[in-house]
Amino acid sequence: MSFLKNVIFNYCFKEKKSPYINFDENSFDDNPDNKKDNVGVDYTLEVKEELSDNLIVNDYMEKEHNIDEQEDKKEDKKDDKKNDKEEDKKEDKEEDKKENESILIGLNNIGATCYMNATIQCLSNTDDLTAYFLNKFPNAPNYNKKKMSYEYYKVVLNLWDKNNKNKPYSPKDFKEKLSEENPLFAGIAANDAKDLIIFLLERFHKELNINKIENNINNNNFDQLAQLDKNKMLNIFINEFKENYNSIISDLFYGVLGITNKCIRCNQIKYNFQVYNCVEFPLEKINQFYFSIGKRNNYNMNNNKNPDIDLYECFNYLNNFELMSGDNQIYCNNCHCLCDSYYQSNLFSSPNYLIINLNRGKGAVYECKVNFPEQLNLYNYIEYKSSNLQFELYAVICHIGESSMEGHFVAYCKNRLDKKWYLYNDAFVNLCENPCEYQKGMAYILFYKIIQ
């Protein structure tokens, strides 16, 4: 018998478990005298043993087969779970992809409204502002369908509508309300994007301000406090600021500007503070200033090509004292008359969203390139040192033409969903490169946000 048969036979003999033969220990006597009798027994056993062996082996193989089937089922279940997990991951990725999918909706030009369209696209790609209008504005205490902020809300809803399939939107109601609120923007005359931005921010703040005090603290007369030191003046200003400014606009866009006036006649120094929502840099004056102090050796007043300006040079210029004389004299409460004075302004605090106007003049455009970085560090230019003064560029308005009141405005924005740069040219939206590299000559308004 084979080895397997021997094992099975010995097991059956020892345990007496075979269903085919009654084992008798005497039948397996090793005595040679009983050999004859054993022959018959051996024959019988051999026949029945073959049957028993076959059935037991078959039973063994059947069990092995069942075990294999169970193992296969376990493996199938593991594969199913693995496939389910992979499907779940795919679904999650698809959901993430849909969540971050670009929504690229242009604005139709409805009559010399490129300045308005470019402004709206930059504001709508301002993360926190758009999140407020989409999620909180309908429940705001100052929510009112007759206000300018409501018309802007309607525009934002359409610009970020996933079901719109990127079809251009016509902001007719917004334009009508804008013309009604400010005659400067009425009709089809061209306008300046900077003027519109300042108007919208101030109007939105007024409509959404929780505090109903109407005082304009920038116009308050602090002359009687002129002898106080700067810190005391600041505390007075901050208290008035808190009483007057409490809106999503002031939270995001408003900073504090420190102003120092020194009368040349009596040497009296007067401190004051103002809120601001846009920093303006007059590019021609800045270039002339650096030429006057010998930092523009290659500057030629008769040359049509003006030297480049670095954005950090603009911030340095802001902190310099400027002589105010002639028509720009400042009233001195000590002398009781207009006097020549030295004027200095500096950024005391910065908002979370910083808007910078590269003023190229109201008449003929002052042509020069401005080097502006994608990441802006203002630590050396802000008097109040907060925990973070690193800013990131997220939108640029460019002007094409010979005058800020003529020509064409376009917007370059980093889409708030997919974080890619796009050119918003009225109804058309196209993927583009970072404008820092190739829009130095036409950049007009820069939008920076603080890096959290």
Image: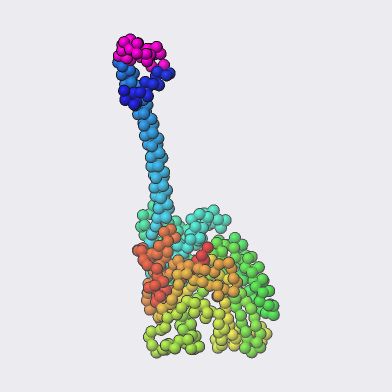
Q: Residue 326 placed where, x, y %?
A: 55, 88
The quadrant of the rendering that contains the N terminus is top left
**Which residue is found at the position 55% from the left and 67% from the top?**
388
Left or right: residue 267 versus residue 53 is: right
Main SS, magenta region, reads: helix
Q: Nearer the viewer, residue 177 or 69?
A: 69
Residue found at x 51% / y 58%: 132
Q: Position of residue 88 (x, y in %)?
A: 41, 45
Judge by depth and name the residue closer to the eye, 275 or 289. 289
Please say if 105 is above or below 313.
above
Task: Tell me the quarter of the picture where residue 246 sits.
Answer: bottom right
Image quarter for residue 276?
bottom right
- Does any portion of residue 399 appear in the rendered image? no
Q: How many marks?
A: 0
Residues in magenta? 16-45
Up the image or down, 35 lies above or below 404; here it is: above
Camera sees residue 391? yes
User: In the image, what residue occupies the spot 52% across and 79% down?
Assistant: 316
Q: Position of residue 146 (x, y in %)?
A: 51, 59
Q: Residue at x 59, y 68 (%)?
A: 386
Q: Is residue 258 left or right of residue 56?
A: right
- Picture quarter containing residue 382? bottom right
Q: Is residue 50 magenta?
A: no
**Front position in the image: 286 or 115:** 286
